[in-house]
């Protein structure tokens, strides 16, 4: 093989690596009590967010699909926005992740997703776009909303449903045990999070059929 060919192959290989290089996500799976998998995703403005950049802060991950009636229950009532406002005011980073594939329920192009955030008065830190579903699958996100709480040290403290009332009825929010509020309050007060898992409920995440 002559020098030209070797140089060309080296360049092609480097180009391939750049092409498939992530908006990254680790191969690690999300398990309570373990380090939460790092990832990098763009928001609706195209700005990239990595979990690692929020070291030192509590982080909430919320899987989002504005077309889902279960999500509608919590946004229509203002329950989700109130949670977002309460805890982002305390320094918590709240990342809402859309893993719906393009063309499926819940997916909007970034510009329209930005409009959806405004329409629903979202108080999340950012909406992140995950149309390939890589981050959602890594975290095992099955439904919307599926909720995760991560410590300032990067440990996954809680994963599961938002509360213990798996319905679409807004009236059920009153009196429900909100697991996300519970986990954040316990952790911020130096207590063990209990429960640290709960059955998630909602609409299935509309992933791309294959990856």
Image (cartoon, rainbow, N blue to C red):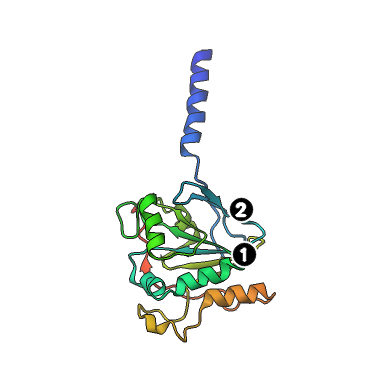
The answer to whether 72 is drawn above or below residue 95 in the figure is below
In three-dimensional space, the C-alpha distance between marks 1 and 2, rounded to whole angstroms, equals 16 Å
- x, y (%) of residue 98? 42, 58
Q: Is residue 1 visible?
A: no
Q: Nearer the viewer, residue 84 or 96?
A: 84
Q: Residue at x 40, y 76 (%)?
A: 77
Q: Residue at x 46, y 46 (%)?
A: 46
What is the crowding at mark 1: few (fewer than 14 residues within 10 Å), some, or many (at least 20)? few
Residue where numbered disc 1 is placed:
91
Examine the image and state in which quarter residue 99 appears.
Answer: bottom left
Q: Residue at x 63, y 60 (%)?
A: 154
Q: Nearer the viewer, mark 1 or mark 2?
A: 1
Examine the image and state in which quarter residue 169 appears.
Answer: bottom left
Q: Nearer the viewer, residue 20 or 187?
A: 187
Secondary structure at badge 2 equals helix
The answer to whether 162 is drawn above or below residue 112 in the figure is below
Residue at the bottom extreme of this rendering: 175
- x, y (%) of residue 97? 46, 58
Residue where numbered disc 2 is placed:
52
- x, y (%) of residue 184? 60, 73
Tell me: 208 left or right of 173: left
- x, y (%) of residue 160? 49, 71
What is the crowding at mark 2: few (fewer than 14 residues within 10 Å), some, or many (at least 20)? some
Q: Residue at x 47, y 51 (%)?
A: 43
Examine the image and state in which quarter residue 195 appears.
Answer: bottom right
For marks 1 and 2, the one nearer the N-term is 2
Q: Which mark is residue 182?
A: none
């Amino acid at each position: 093989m002559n020098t030209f060919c070797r140089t060309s192959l080296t360049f092609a290989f480097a180009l391939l690596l750049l092409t498939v290089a992530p908006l990254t996500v680790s191969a690690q799976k999300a398990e309570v009590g373990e380090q939460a998998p790092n990832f990098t995703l763009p928001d609706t403005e195209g700005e990239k967010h990595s979990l690692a950049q929020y070291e030192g802060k509590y982080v909430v991950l919320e899987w989002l699909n504005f077309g889902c009636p279960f999500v509608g229950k919590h946004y229509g009532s203002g329950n989700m926005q109130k949670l977002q406002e309460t805890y982002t005011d305390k320094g918590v980073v709240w990342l809402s992740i859309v893993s719906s594939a393009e063309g499926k329920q819940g997916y909007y192009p970034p510009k329209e997703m930005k409009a959806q955030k405004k329409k629903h008065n979202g108080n999340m830190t950012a909406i992140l776009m995950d149309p390939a579903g890589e981050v959602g699958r890594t975290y095992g996100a099955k439904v919307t909303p599926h909720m995760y709480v991560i410590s300032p040290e990067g440990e996954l403290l809680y994963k599961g449903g938002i509360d213990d009332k798996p319905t679409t009825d807004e009236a059920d929010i009153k009196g429900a045990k909100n697991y996300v509020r519970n986990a954040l309050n316990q952790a911020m007060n130096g207590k063990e999070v209990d429960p640290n898992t709960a059955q998630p409920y909602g609409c299935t995440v509309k992933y791309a059929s294959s990856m």
